Image (tube, coloured by chain):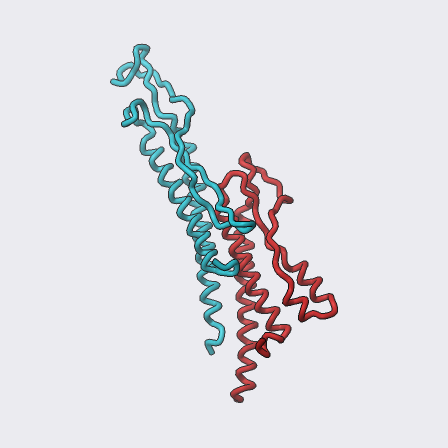
Chain colours: A red, B cyan
Amino acid sequence: MNWIDKDTIYILLKKMCNICVLRHRVIANNIANVDTPGFQARRVVFEEKLKNALRGANTKENLQNITPEIRIDNVTRSLREDLNNVDIEKEMVRLSVNSLRYSIYIQLLDKKLEKIKLAIKGR
Amino acid sequence: MSTFSLFSAMQISASGMSAERIRLNVIASNIANAKVTRTLQGGPYRRKEVVFASILNEKIGEGVQVVGIFRDPSPFKMIYNPSHPDANEQGYVAMPNVDVILEMIDMISSARAYEANLTAFKIAQSMIRKALEIGRK
């Protein structure tokens, strides 16, 4: 294990980037299936688990062990005849929110690495 | 492919675009043949319909695919026109079971779905570009 892999912020940012990619994939799949009869939208459940992991005692281990879960959305009721419950507008909004969050995490990660570089090279 | 891969997300968007393009092709064929009374199979043109199904891989979907293009079994429209060469003894002509208005609506919905998939694809592209910016400076 590398020394940087033990840094809590680094672990967290890396994890969040992965979650964003996974979420993008799931939303892209929902959009691709907007006309598939009987299709039910899928959701990535992660933030709840993250909250619990951060609340516990040994945060670092908890962080490494939490994994995202993909759930089928059976709460949203379908208003269509073919029982498809994909709401295209909401999915598009989720898609762009997700991409903006991804760029935040990437920027934070970049700054983090920049600081390490500064520590190595000096000004 | 890995679950955490933007490239597989792009594949999913591509599957959506390709399915919508096939649907658009079939709709175009239906509109073009809305008044055709003679086909190779004999009789008037029968409306075609595309059937979609999602590709399932465990719990995460892998996009959408076209299962098949089926013929609409609904009856032909009988229109009274004795001067038509294909009219029967009573003077009625069997016209294709295509409703042009319905096809136009389907066409718009298909084009919009295509655009939505394209947007998802472009966002995946921009996310990859952002990831490439790590450590640039």
Side (left or right) of A22 relative to A63: left
**Is residue B121 shown above or below A105?**
above
Q: Quadrant of residue A100?
A: bottom right
What is the residue that sits farthest to the bottom in this orientation? A122
Pick whichever, A51 or A67, lies toward us.
A67
- Residue at 47% across, 56% down: B9
User: Residue B133's spot in the image, x, y percent?
Assistant: 47, 72
- Residue at 54% across, 64% down: A102
User: Residue B42's spot in the image, x, y percent?
Assistant: 29, 23
Side (left or right) of B17 relative to A14: left
User: Residue A121's spot in the image, x, y percent?
Assistant: 52, 87
- Residue at 47% across, 78% down: B137
Q: Quadrant of residue A101?
A: bottom right
For the N terminus of chain A, which image quadrant?
bottom right
What is the residue that sits farthest to the left in this orientation? B85
What is the residue that sits farthest to the right in this orientation? A57
User: Residue A95's spot in the image, x, y percent?
Assistant: 53, 55
**Is residue B22 shown above or below B60?**
above
What is the residue that sits farthest to the top in this orientation? B90
**Is residue A5 shown above or below A55?**
below
Marks counted in the figure total: 0
- Residue at 48% across, 41% down: B53
Pick whichever, B60 or A100, lies toward us.
B60
